[in-house]
Image (cartoon, helix red, strand yellow):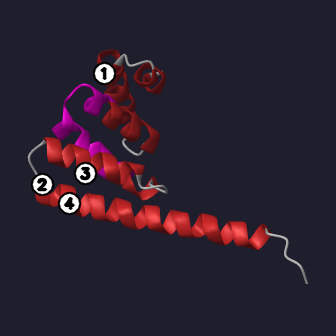
Amino acid sequence: MGETLVDLQRVEEAIPLLNRALAGDPKLLAAHKALARAYLAAGRAAQAIPHLQAALATDEDGSLHYQLASAYQASGQPSLSKQALLKYQKIQGSAVAAREAAKREVEITAP
């Protein structure tokens, strides 16, 4: 329900629901991600940071690191923002390389 409210831009309604979900199970990574998005959308970047950090292990495309960089920047932590942005760029580079390798594996070439 909380994630749906975030998707609908009803973040002030989503925040308490997501906090309750995490109080029940602090390991719910999807709830951490959704709560971070809600806090960012509500202009509460500093509150988003611990939830982004909690979910970083699931960041396959770098988007969480990018959001973390934005949150650090908005909360006056430019050096941490730069570190998160560098990690985002590294993940993005790896993802692009993996897509290119996958493309080459399925290409049909002449003998």
Q: Which mark is residue 16?
A: 1
In the structure shown, which secondary structural element does the residue marked by tag 1 occupy? helix
Q: Mark 3 or mark 1: name the one nearer the start of the chain.
A: 1
**Mark 4 element type:** helix
Left or right: 21 as drawn, with respect to 1: left
Is the residue marked by circle 4 packed among few (<14), some (14-19), or many (20+) residues within 10 Å? some
Of 26 and 68, the residue lying toward us = 68
- Label 3 SS: helix
**In the image, what residue type sits under mark 3?**
Ala
Q: Residue at x 18, y 48 (%)?
A: 72
Q: Which mark is residue 82?
A: 4
- Residue under pointer 2: 78
Alpha carbon distance from label 1 to label 4: 31 Å
View extreme (right): residue? 111
- Is 6 part of what is drawn in magenta? no
The numbered mark, 1 or 4, whose residue comes first in the sequence reads 1
Q: Quadrant of residue 75?
A: top left
3D distance between C-alphas at marks 3 and 2: 8 Å
The image position of residue 22, as x and y in percent, is: 36, 35
Between the residue at mark 3 and the residue at mark 4, the CA separation in whole angstroms equals 7 Å
Residue kind at label 4, given as amino acid type: Lys
Q: Which mark is residue 69?
A: 3
Identify the residue shown where x is 12% and y is 54%: 78
- 106 or 52, which lies in front? 106
